[in-house]
């Protein structure tokens, strides 16, 4: 009791602001409320689309984002409300356990943290509900990098629900408004997760999905994950093509977005058609979408187009076009394109001069971290005369990338 009254005394400093409701924290509702029905299959699949998010709305590029590796948790300004600050970690641990994500507690204010709780006394931006807000930063690879969960002590309280809501954002989930969920604005009074939240969270962290997955590829696989958790026989997913209305709806939305000039949408449609994610494989249509994105300055798509021309997949072989697209992306420091160009030039080269150019691109691909860069560089280097090799190494050392396009910059920092 003594400990509790001391905590309340610390809170009193802020009580005049009409701030904290410690009683609500003490009577936290159960973590999972079983009373809400599990949503129908298609509704859950549609809700899961919010995981990868709406491409180009709110600046998102539409790739799956989640934690890989442990969450390193810390609190800033704990003194402003020790009891509320202390309530976040247990909640985070319980929710992260559902996703099998490890949570490591660091000392308060530790700069090595990647999940920071900050106390504020004003309303804020981010994805906030008024009482709390989360800012979620991800790497281009889709790995979550930094979450800041702000708790507004000047708000009316009822923090448990908002903390849980923001923790789910901090694990990578968006707002599935159409189903009973603590993340849905249709159910503002929910302070517990529902079965639906658990299904979405477990699906997001299933090993068959990876950070960086595109939207249709994610949804295609999510069908099996949702089936498994809702008692639907997985064989039925394929046999009855479950979730097809949702996949078609998302594909139509992405097509509209791409036709309005959405570059990421065009690029992702390219992947979907080329590889057959949620649609039948159609190489020609895949390359056509990639070309749109490439011609808008997107290097990732330019690299795909280059490969297609050089191999004659989806388009007739056109070495000039292939080389042109590859060079464009390679000059903007796209490692895949640098590797592609090096490999192609090395295969085509009859004279040491062009082998030297191949070597420069191979060195750059290796330097940029291409997984096969070292092997290719070694192979080409063995064929290049000593003097040419030194020249190539000097050129690579002095090489500077062409300015990044706006769309490349947006892709790399979602
Ligand atoms: Zn929210």
Image (cartoon, grey):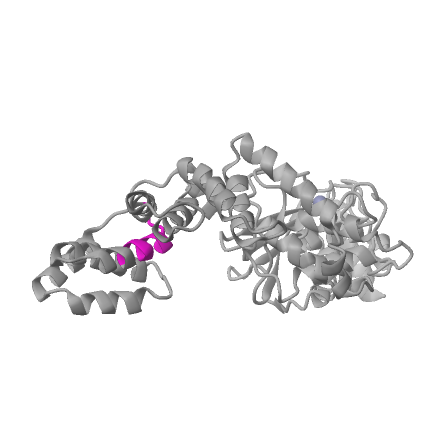
Q: Is residue 338 magenta?
A: yes
Q: Is residue 116 visible?
A: yes
Judge left or right: residue 77 versus residue 332.
right
Q: Which residue in the rendered view is the most extreme toward the top?
A: 260
Relative to 385, does residue 64 appear above or below in the rendering? above
Q: Is residue 198 magenta?
A: no
Quadrant position of ligand 1: top right
- Residue at point 63%, 51% (across, down): 278
Image quadrant for the N terminus?
A: bottom right
Front residue of 159 and 174: 174
- Percent x, y for residue 157? 80, 46
- Percent x, y for residue 67? 59, 61
Relative to 327, does residue 71 appear above or below in the rendering? below
Q: Quadrant of residue 184?
A: top right
Relative to 7, does residue 316 appear above or below in the rendering? above
- Percent x, y for residue 115? 60, 58
Front residue of 32 and 258: 258
Q: Quadrant of residue 86?
A: bottom right
Residue span colored magenta:
332-342
- Residue at point 69%, 41% (across, down): 249
Q: Main secondary structure of the magenta part?
A: helix
Q: Is residue 170 visible?
A: no
Q: Which residue in the rendered view is the most extreme toward the left?
A: 387
């Amino acid at each position: 009791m003594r400990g509790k009254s001391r905590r309340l005394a610390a809170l009193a400093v802020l009580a005049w602001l009409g701030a904290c409701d410690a009683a609500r924290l003490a009577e936290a509702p159960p973590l999972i409320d079983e009373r809400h029905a599990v949503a129908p299959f298609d509704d859950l699949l549609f809700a899961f689309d919010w995981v990868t998010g709406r491409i180009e709305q709110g600046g998102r590029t539409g790739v799956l984002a989640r934690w890989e590796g442990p969450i390193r948790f810390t609190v800033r300004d704990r003194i402003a409300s020790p009891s509320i600050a202390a309530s976040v970690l247990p909640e985070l641990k319980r929710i992260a356990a559902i996703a099998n994500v490890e949570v490591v507690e660091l000392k308060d204010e530790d700069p090595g943290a990647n999940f920071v709780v900050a106390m504020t006394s004003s309303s804020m931006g981010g994805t906030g509900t008024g009482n709390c807000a989360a800012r979620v930063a991800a790497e281009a690879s889709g790995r979550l990098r930094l979450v800041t969960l702000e708790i507004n002590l000047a708000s009316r309280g009822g923090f448990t629900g908002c903390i849980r809501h923001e923790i789910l954002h901090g694990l990578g989930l968006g707002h599935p408004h159409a189903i009973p969920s603590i993340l849905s604005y249709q159910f503002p009074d929910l302070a517990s997760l529902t079965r639906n939240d658990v299904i979405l969270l477990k699906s997001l962290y299933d090993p068959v999905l990876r950070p960086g997955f595109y939207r249709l590829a994610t949804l295609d696989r999510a069908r099996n994950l949702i089936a498994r958790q809702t008692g639907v026989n997985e064989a039925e997913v394929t046999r009855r093509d479950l979730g097809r209305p949702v996949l078609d709806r998302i594909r139509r939305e992405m097509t509209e977005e791409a036709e309005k000039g959405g570059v990421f949408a065009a690029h992702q449609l390219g992947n979907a058609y080329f590889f057959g994610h949620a649609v039948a494989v159609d190489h020609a249509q895949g390359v056509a979408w990639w070309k749109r994105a490439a011609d808008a300055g997107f290097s990732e798509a330019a690299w795909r187009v280059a490969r297609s021309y050089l191999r004659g997949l989806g388009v007739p072989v056109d070495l000039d076009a292939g080389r042109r697209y590859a060079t464009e992306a390679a000059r903007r420091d796209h490692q895949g394109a640098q590797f592609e160009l090096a490999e192609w030039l090395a295969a085509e080269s009859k004279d040491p001069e062009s082998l030297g150019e191949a070597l420069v691109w191979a060195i750059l691909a290796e330097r940029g971290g291409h997984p096969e860069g070292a092997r290719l560089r070694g192979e080409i280097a063995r064929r290049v005369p000593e003097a040419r090799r030194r020249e190539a190494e000097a050129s690579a050392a002095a090489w500077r990338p062409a300015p990044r396009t706006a769309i490349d910059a947006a892709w790399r920092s979602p």
